[in-house]
Image (cartoon, helix red, strand yellow):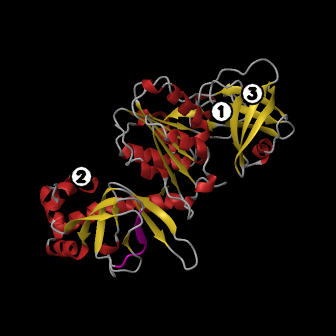
């Protein structure tokens, strides 16, 4: 059953995107692992899966929502004090703890940075457990760049390589222009030691997987976050079936070699 | 100081290239350095040279009268700048500007085309070497045009 959560804070990230801090009205916030999602219920409108986008240390759930439909639009228009329903956390997380010792290639496109942000927080809080850490981010254009201020903060660190690109520049932009896959050959990482975490539109993830494999990263060292239409979120209803798996239960984070045979199949 | 041939051997574009191939290309090459803001080439000018980037970053842009130039791609270490030298009428299709201090090896296009014409096996190897990054750029451009981060 959805639990009542109050909107404690609304931060406008982009013209159509907000970050909501959701405080439990009963009890404490459940524990979650980066990569997992909650079902957010806008009363009278509907329910959608949204990944956590905040750190584990907060006493609220942090979700970044883009207005792309009826339910997400209703969530994106919430004001502080509003009450919504929330079920979760659900799903398989990023394997952050399991890949200690590896080089990390964290590659995000567009809103895909939101589900990866908790993973980045966890890695940076435990920086000495990992080898090289590279974060590559592709955005549509400079004005629609998610978490821009935070990207600039991370860039100040000497122990993580941040590289950002935009598909379409404006006259004020002085950074990279081109798709995010172009950043991969330029990044300093050892493909034998690297583990890649990818989140973004599925087409972007396909190109990114191809570029990583050309660079020598093995498919079992690549993780992608899948998105499908979810309803029950516990692997019962079948709405999010992806081949022999359910994205809500077996994903959203999936190891690429386990889905490689169906990843680019348009019928699935 | 490293010779052009030694520098080319280290450049990703010539990774795994036979020594003879690198030697022939190096014979057409020279060190070229551009300060930030300096242009490597201008749209419409003869494409009589192309550049292999060793250090720095280059922005490719197109300008329309009355508008600020639009950068459509940036290139970095390991990339090459320019393919217009490969096909007639051998004229640049865009402006290329160094974003920061950029060191390149400039290759004399007429010299290299002459060597390709004189030795078709070498010419075929060179075309194959260029084709890989060109096809990759074409695929990346398709992805760029798809506007995958927009609302769909």
Would you identify the image quadrant in which residue B112 lies? bottom left
Q: Give the range drawn in magenta.
A: B91-98
Residue at mark 3? A87
On the image, numbered disc 2 is attached to which residue? B15
Label 3 resides on the chain identified as A
Residue A236, given in percent of the width and then of the height, sits at 69, 28
Residue B12 point in image, percent of width and height: 28, 53
- Residue B82: give its label: none
The residue nearer to you, when weighing A65 against A38, is A65
Is any part of residue A237 visible from this angle?
A: no
SS under mark 1: loop
Q: In which quarter of the image is the N terminus of chain A?
A: top right
In whole angstroms, how far apart are the C-alphas of marks 3 and 1?
12 Å
Q: Position of residue A240 (x, y in %)?
A: 65, 37
User: Which labelled disc corresponds to residue A52?
Assistant: 1
Q: Nearer the viewer, mark 3 or mark 2?
A: 2
> Viewed as shown, does residue B50 lie left or right of A258?
left
Looking at marks 3 and 1 on the same chain, the residue that comes earlier in the sequence is marked by: 1
Query: Does A51 sit above or below residue B62?
Result: above
Which chain does the residue under circle 2 lie in? B
Discs 3, 1: same chain: yes
State the separation of the CA atoms marked 3 and 2.
Answer: 53 Å
- Give the side of residue A162 with respect to residue A29, left or right: left
Residue plotted at (49% across, 47% down): A206
Q: Tell me if mark 1 has few (under 14), some (14-19) or many (20+) residues whose alpha carbon lies within 10 angstroms of its own.
A: many
Q: A211 above or below B14?
A: above
């Amino acid at each position: 059953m959805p639990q009542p959560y109050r909107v404690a804070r609304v931060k406008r990230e982009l013209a159509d995107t907000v970050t909501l801090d959701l405080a439990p009205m009963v009890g404490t916030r459940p524990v979650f692992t980066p990569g997992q999602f909650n079902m957010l219920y806008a009363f009278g409108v509907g329910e959608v899966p949204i990944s956590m986008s905040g750190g584990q240390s907060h006493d609220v759930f942090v979700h970044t929502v883009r207005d792309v439909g009826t339910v997400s639009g209703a969530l994106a228009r919430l004001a502080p004090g509003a009450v919504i329903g929330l079920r979760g956390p659900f799903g398989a997380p990023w394997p952050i703890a399991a890949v200690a010792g590896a080089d990390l290639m964290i590659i995000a496109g567009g809103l895909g940075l939101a589900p990866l942000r908790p993973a980045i927080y966890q890695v940076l809080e435990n920086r000495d457990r990992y080898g090289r850490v590279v974060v590559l981010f592709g955005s549509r254009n400079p004005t629609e760049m998610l978490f821009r201020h935070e990207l600039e903060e991370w860039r100040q660190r000497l122990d993580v390589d941040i590289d950002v690109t935009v598909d379409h520049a404006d006259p004020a932009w002085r950074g990279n222009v081109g798709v995010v896959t172009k950043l991969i050959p330029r990044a300093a990482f050892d493909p034998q030691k690297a583990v890649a975490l990818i989140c973004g539109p599925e087409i972007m993830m396909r190109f990114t997987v191809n570029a990583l494999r050309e660079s020598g990263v093995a498919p079992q060292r690549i993780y992608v976050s899948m998105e499908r239409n979810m309803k029950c979120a516990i692997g019962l209803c079948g709405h999010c079936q992806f081949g022999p798996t359910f994205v809500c239960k077996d994903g959203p984070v999936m190891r690429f070699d386990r889905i490689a045979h169906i990843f680019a199949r348009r019928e699935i | 100081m490293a010779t052009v041939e030694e520098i080319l051997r280290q450049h990703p574009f010539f990774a795994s290239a036979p020594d003879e191939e690198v030697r022939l290309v190096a014979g057409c090459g020279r060190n070229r350095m551009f300060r930030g803001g300096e242009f490597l080439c201008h749209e419409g000018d003869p494409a009589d040279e192309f550049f292999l980037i060793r250090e720095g970053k280059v922005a490719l842009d197109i300008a329309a009268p009355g508008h600020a130039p639009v950068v459509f791609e940036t290139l970095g270490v390991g990339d090459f700048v320019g393919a217009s030298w490969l096909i007639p009428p051998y004229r640049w299709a865009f402006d290329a500007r160094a974003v920061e201090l950029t060191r390149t090896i400039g290759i004399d296009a007429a010299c290299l085309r002459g060597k390709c014409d004189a030795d078709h096996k070498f010419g075929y190897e060179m075309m194959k070497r260029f084709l890989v990054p060109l096809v990759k750029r074409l695929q990346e451009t398709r992805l760029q045009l798809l506007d995958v981060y927009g609302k769909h």
